[in-house]
């Protein structure tokens, strides 16, 4: 089922994001996590696309396999990096032939070793161009990314929002946010987006904190911030992985509850190919729903 149709049907949706593994052990971990999370009946799962298109074939293969063999709706990520228009058209055709109906269109990060994004000759410069092209091919529900605290390359929040409006006008039917740890960022962002005419569903992206060092790297790369009380608590438990896991799950559970109560259309979990934290968060939400 197309994600835009699922969103239009109403009720919160829950989705999980995975990345193509680079080793046999990583692949085993991926399918084990998928097997665990399948029991939670997610609305869909998404598969990321490596920098420079480095995992392009794996992304297509895994997304199609999830849809075909596991029976979960799947969404493939697609970026502008390293691909011409003709190559993008081939990838979309391959996904469509495999039964994949959902594509998240992104500009993509520069390949490793490059500081700035450079358009591939014969390719696309912006995510909005990719959205328009894939939407024009037909057959797929096209989504795009958004940034509650602003994209790291945007000069200010208004410029970032204008770029997002361009993506929506180009054909994005839903949006998935970058990770954030303070729900006020999400709700303020939604209000600002609605004020400029962005009326598509905006799905909040949540990453349960599992490692202090890891989340510090992620937030530095994407420009997200961690509330001072949370980072102070994490810093005190930095040497205790179990405590960090528990703090991460507790914080994310409260975030998800507040987002859903505030009207968010669902939650997109950045799983990092692991299932434990996500399962614990959904169990906490289920318990609250029964109270």
Image (tube, helix red, strand yellow):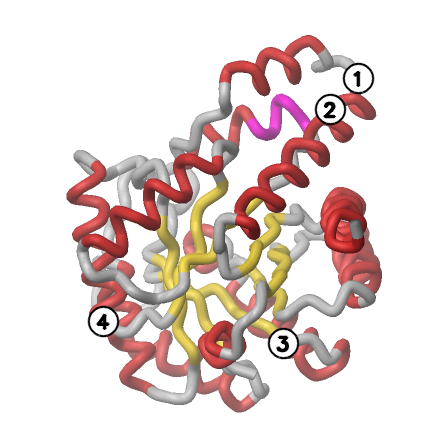
For the residues bearing labels 2 and 1, Cβ distance under 8 angstroms: yes
- Sequence-earlier tag: 4 or 1: 4
Residue shown at the point (42%, 35%) measured from the top left: 184
User: From the viewer's perspective, is 228 left or right of 69?
Assistant: left
On the image, numbered disc 2 is attached to which residue? 244
Kind of element beneath mark 1: loop
The magenta span reads 211-215
Residue 162 placement (x, y as % from top left): 17, 52
Residue 160 placement (x, y as % from top left): 22, 45
Kind of element beneath mark 4: helix
Q: Tell me the CA gap for discs 3 and 1.
A: 36 Å
Residue shown at the point (49%, 41%) measured from the top left: 179
Kind of element beneath mark 3: loop
Residue 242 placement (x, y as % from top left): 82, 25
Q: Tell me the CA gap for discs 2 and 1.
A: 6 Å
* 214 is within the stretch colored magenta: yes
Q: Nearer the viewer, residue 58 or 257?
A: 257
Q: Tell me the CA gap for discs 4 and 3.
A: 24 Å
Residue 240 - label: 1
What secondary structure do most residues of the magenta stretch adopt?
A: helix
Residue extending farthest to the front is 291
**Residue 120 visible in the shown view:** no
Density class for disc 1 (Cα within 10 Å; few <14, some 14-19, many ≥20) is: few
On the image, numbered disc 4 is attached to which residue? 170
Kind of element beneath mark 2: helix
- Sequence-earlier tag: 3 or 1: 3
Residue 73 - label: 3
**Residue 148 visible in the shown view:** yes
Density class for disc 4 (Cα within 10 Å; few <14, some 14-19, many ≥20) is: many
For the residues bearing labels 3 and 1, Cβ distance under 8 angstroms: no
Q: Nearer the viewer, residue 181 or 60?
A: 181
């Amino acid at each position: 089922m197309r994600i835009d149709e699922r969103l239009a049907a109403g009720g919160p949706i829950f989705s999980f994001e995975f990345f193509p593994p680079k080793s046999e052990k990583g692949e085993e971990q991926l399918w084990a996590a998928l097997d665990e999370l399948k029991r939670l009946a997610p609305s869909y799962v998404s598969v990321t696309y490596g920098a420079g298109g480095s995992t392009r074939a794996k992304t297509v293969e895994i997304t199609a396999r999830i849809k075909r063999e596991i029976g979960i709706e799947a969404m493939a990520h697609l970026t502008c990096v390293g691909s011409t228009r003709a190559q993008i058209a081939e990838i979309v055709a391959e996904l469509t032939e495999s039964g994949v109906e959902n594509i998240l269109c992104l500009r993509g990060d520069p390949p490793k070793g490059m500081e700035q994004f450079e358009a591939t000759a014969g390719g696309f410069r912006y995510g909005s161009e990719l959205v328009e092209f894939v939407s024009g091919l037909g057959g797929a529900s096209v989504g795009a990314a958004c940034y509650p605290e602003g994209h790291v390359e945007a000069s200010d929040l208004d410029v970032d929002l204008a770029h997002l409006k361009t993506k929506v006008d180009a054909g994005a039917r839903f949006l998935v946010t970058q990770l954030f740890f303070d729900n006020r960022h999400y709700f303020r962002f939604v209000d600002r987006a609605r004020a400029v005419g962005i009326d598509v569903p905006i799905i909040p992206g949540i990453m349960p904190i599992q490692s202090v060092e890891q989340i510090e790297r992620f937030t530095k790369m994407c420009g997200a911030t961690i509330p001072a009380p949370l980072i102070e608590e994490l810093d005190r438990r930095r040497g205790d992985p179990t405590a960090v896991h528990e703090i991460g799950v507790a914080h994310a559970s409260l975030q998800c509850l507040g987002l859903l109560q505030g009207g968010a259309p669902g939650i997109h979990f950045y799983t990092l190919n692991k299932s434990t934290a996500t399962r614990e968060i959904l169990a906490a939400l289920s318990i609250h729903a029964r109270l």
